[in-house]
Amino acid sequence: MTQESRLAFQASKSANIIKNLHTIYGISLQDATDIFYQSDTAELIEEGIADLQCRSDKYLASLIWDEFQESRQ
């Protein structure tokens, strides 16, 4: 996979996760974007750690949402 295709894949993956956060949890796209980019999970996905990028977008959205909820406690 070239660097360019890797970046395109990551951008698409991030957009799909943000869209799922928005749809599943009924939050604005801006809030979903903020939650995504402030999460540790997003950083791990971008670094390719633990093959998280291979997981479904809905699963990753729920993982990020759980992380967000735990950070608010």
Image: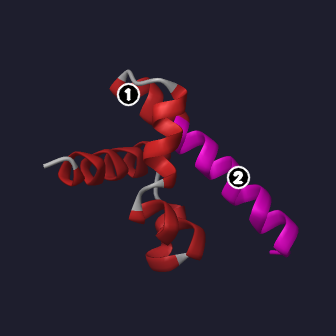
Number of the label disc, if any, that sits on residue 11: 2
Residue lying at 49% horizontally and 60% vertically, measured from the top left: 42
Number of the label disc, if any, that sits on residue 44: none
Q: Quadrant of residue 26?
A: top left
Q: Secondary structure at mark 1?
A: helix
Q: What x and y, as percent, mark residue 15?
A: 62, 42
User: Magenta includes 44?
Assistant: no
Q: How is the image coloured?
A: secondary structure
Q: Main secondary structure of the magenta part?
A: helix
Where is 7 relative to 37, above or below? below
Q: Residues within 10 Å of mark 1 (few under 14, many from 20)?
A: few
Where is 19 relative to 37, above or below? above
Where is 68 relative to 5, above or below? above
Query: Which amino acid type is marked by label 1?
Result: Ile
Numbered circles on residues, count: 2
Q: Quadrant of residue 16?
A: top right
Q: Secondary structure at mark 2?
A: helix
Q: What x and y, as percent, mark residue 49?
A: 49, 78
For residue 44, side relative to residue 66 (left or right): right
For residue 38, side relative to residue 71 (left or right): right
Q: CA distance from mark 1 to mark 2?
A: 20 Å
Q: What x and y, as percent, mark residue 21?
A: 43, 35
Number of the label disc, if any, that sits on residue 24: 1
Residue lying at 42% horizontally and 63% vertically, measured from the top left: 41
Q: Which residues are magenta?
A: 1-18
Pointer 1 or 2: first along the chain: 2
Query: Which amino acid type is marked by label 2?
Result: Ala
Contact, CB < 8 Å: mark 1 with mark 2? no
| Quarter of the image with the N terminus in it | bottom right
